Amino acid sequence: MEKITILLADDHAVLREGMRRLLEQHKDMVVLAEAADGEQAVKLVAELLPNVVLMDIVMPGLNGVEATKLIKKQNPGTAVLILTAYEDERYILGLLEAGVAGYLLKSATGEEIVKAIRAVHAGESVLHPSVMAKLLARAARSFTELTPQPGKSELTEREMSVLQLAARGMSNKELAQQLNLAMPTIKSHLVNIFNKIGVASRTEAVLLALKKGWVRL
């Protein structure tokens, strides 16, 4: 079984230890390392190339948002999942623009965190569809660069359809029903989209497409 490799980034040692124990109870997950601050997280991601980073926001020195920006710039294939105490819409939007694949509140259960890690590793969004749609609509209003840019032609017509529907907050199951395709086919299309435009999650893909003016809400 191919395991999901994970980096934990949080300045609270007790939380990291508890999270490691929780995740390593699952046979499909392994924690490669722990980081106590953003700078250490960036360094360890460059060295270890984990599939997923579980990232806190408020840490000494380099915070989670800035660390995420650097990680996504240097290692776009690594998905960053924020685990935070903040739920302000404006704050979440800033995190999405930084390149995170999704976010969870620290009130989440262990089962929810495990499911979220598996989801972002598979290219899914951990945001509820209605929340996703609201945040993306806000993001679309904030983008001024709406002229299509080079790169759109790399996506097939079907991939553009998948991306457009994903921008409406549809889940993989809803995409499959809407397009009359099998779930594995939808996942394959999403992976192809991610690879072509250099992102690691549907959240990043939709935000990039909105920013470039490839899709409209």
Image: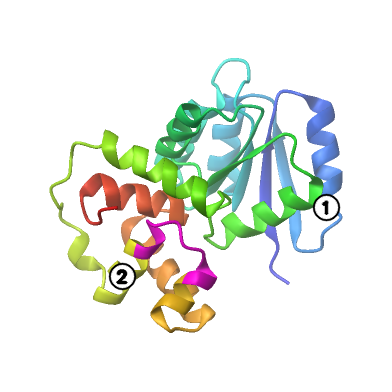
Q: Secondary structure at mark 1?
A: loop
Question: Is any atom of residue 204 visible in this view?
Answer: yes
Residue flagged by tag 2: what amino acid is it?
A: Ser
Which residue carries the number 2 mark? 161
| Sooner in the amino-acid sequence: mark 1 or mark 2 | 1
In the image, what residue type sits under mark 1? Glu
155 or 133: nearer the eye? 133
Let me know if residue 143 is in the magenta part: no
- Where residue 209 appears, as percent x and y from the top left, is 29, 53
Element assignment for label 2 = helix
Q: Is residue 116 above or below residue 69?
A: below
At x 71%, y 46%, the residue is: 32
Residue drawn at the location 56% of the way across and 51% of the way down? 128
Judging depth in this view, the residue of 6 and 173 nearest the camera is 173
Q: Give the vertical position of 155 relative to 139 (above or below).
A: below
Taking the magenta stretch, the answer to whether it contains residue 168 is yes
Crowding at dot 1, Cα within 10 Å, few <14 / some 14-19 / many 20+, comes out as: few
Q: Residue at x 63, y 24 (%)?
A: 37
- Front residue of 145 and 54: 145
Residues rendered magenta in the picture: 165-174
Q: Which mark is residue 163?
A: none
Q: Report the residue at 61% width, 43% height from top.
A: 53
Whether residue 74 can be seen here: no
Up-down: is 86 above or below 156? Answer: above
User: Where does residue 89 sit, x and y in percent of width and height?
Assistant: 49, 31
Q: Where is residue 127 shown, x and y percent of the image?
A: 55, 48
Question: Residue 2's quadrant in the figure?
Answer: bottom right
19 with respect to 172 (left or right): right
Q: Which residue is mark 1?
A: 24
The Cα–Cα distance between marks 1 and 2, rounded to whole angstroms, is 38 Å
Please provide percent x and percent y for residue 46. 53, 41
In the picture, which quadrant includes the N terminus?
Answer: bottom right
